[in-house]
Amino acid sequence: MKHSKFPPQVYTKDELNRILMACGGHPNGLRNRAIIMMGYRCGLRCAEALALHRSDIALDQGHVLIQRGKGGKSRRIGLPDDAAAAVRSTWNAEPMRGEWAFPTSSAGKLCTSYVRTLLPRLARRANIAKRLHFHGLRHTFAWELSQEGVPMPIIQRALGHSSLNTTAVYLDHLAPHDVINATRNRA
């Protein structure tokens, strides 16, 4: 596994709410909010979210089919109500433009570079000092699942990791204090 030059980042619910509010209510803002929700609430990679077709998102059934995942792997992930509402809002704001779930204004596929430059702008607008990046949304998703007691193999499958070790590295970097507390407070 490659190691990032930045440590894993987790965002608080307050920070995420401020980021989502910073998107605004215009059609592109609604689209951007839905993309962010796909990372935060569904654990998608940026490229996975941008590669979604409308037909991949089953709003009424509450799931998303990731057909173009890393390594060519596909998986199905749950779609929480708040993420479904964000997608529904963006789709209702503008008529359907092509096959992409989150298209450009000319119906093309959004590039990851757009999101990479968007997130720091949103962080400044939301007055958040932390480095805001899409993979941090995924880290937050994994962290929240672990805090809710979801077993690591389920988190692994949700994230699309081929190895449980990759998932363990994600969570070990995020919560070394949990190991200390669990071993210190034994009866």
Image (cartoon, grey):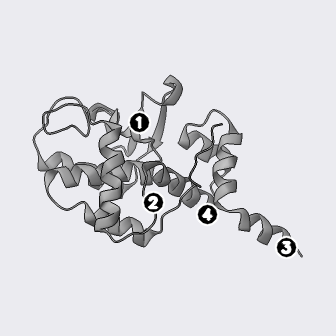
Image coordinates for residue 142, horizontal then vertical, percent: 56, 53
Q: Which residue is mark 1?
A: 48
Residue at image position (43%, 49%) is 134
Q: Is residue 80 left or right of residue 89?
A: right
Front position in the image: 109 or 128 = 128
In this view, the mark in front (4 or 1): 1
* Three-letter code, disc 4: Gln
Under mark 2, the amino acid is Arg
| Dot 2 or dot 1, earlier in sequence | 1
Asked whether the viewer can see residue 91, the reply is yes
Q: Is residue 73 left or right of residue 106?
A: right
The residue singled out by tag 4 in the image is 147
In space, the residues marked 2 and 4 are separated at their CA atoms by: 22 Å
Mark before the other along the chain sequence, 2 or 3: 2
Using the image, determine if residue 60 lies above or below residue 30: above
User: What is the residue that sits farthest to the left in this orientation?
Assistant: 95
Q: Position of residue 53 (x, y in %)?
A: 29, 32
Label 4 to label 1, Cα distance in Å? 24 Å
Q: Amino acid under label 3?
A: Arg
The residue at which mark 2 appears reads as: 131
1 or 3: tag closer to the N-terminus: 1
Where is mark 3, residue-wise?
A: 184
| Label 2 – label 1 distance at C-alpha | 21 Å
In the rendered image, which quarter is residue 97 located in? top left
Q: Residue furthest front?
A: 5
Residue 89 against residue 180 in the figure, above or below: above
Which quadrant of the structure image shows residue 153? Answer: top right
Q: Secondary structure at mark 1?
A: helix
Q: Are marks 1 and 3 in contact (CB under 8 Å)?
A: no
Q: Quadrant of the C terminus?
A: bottom right
**84 left or right, relative to 174:** left
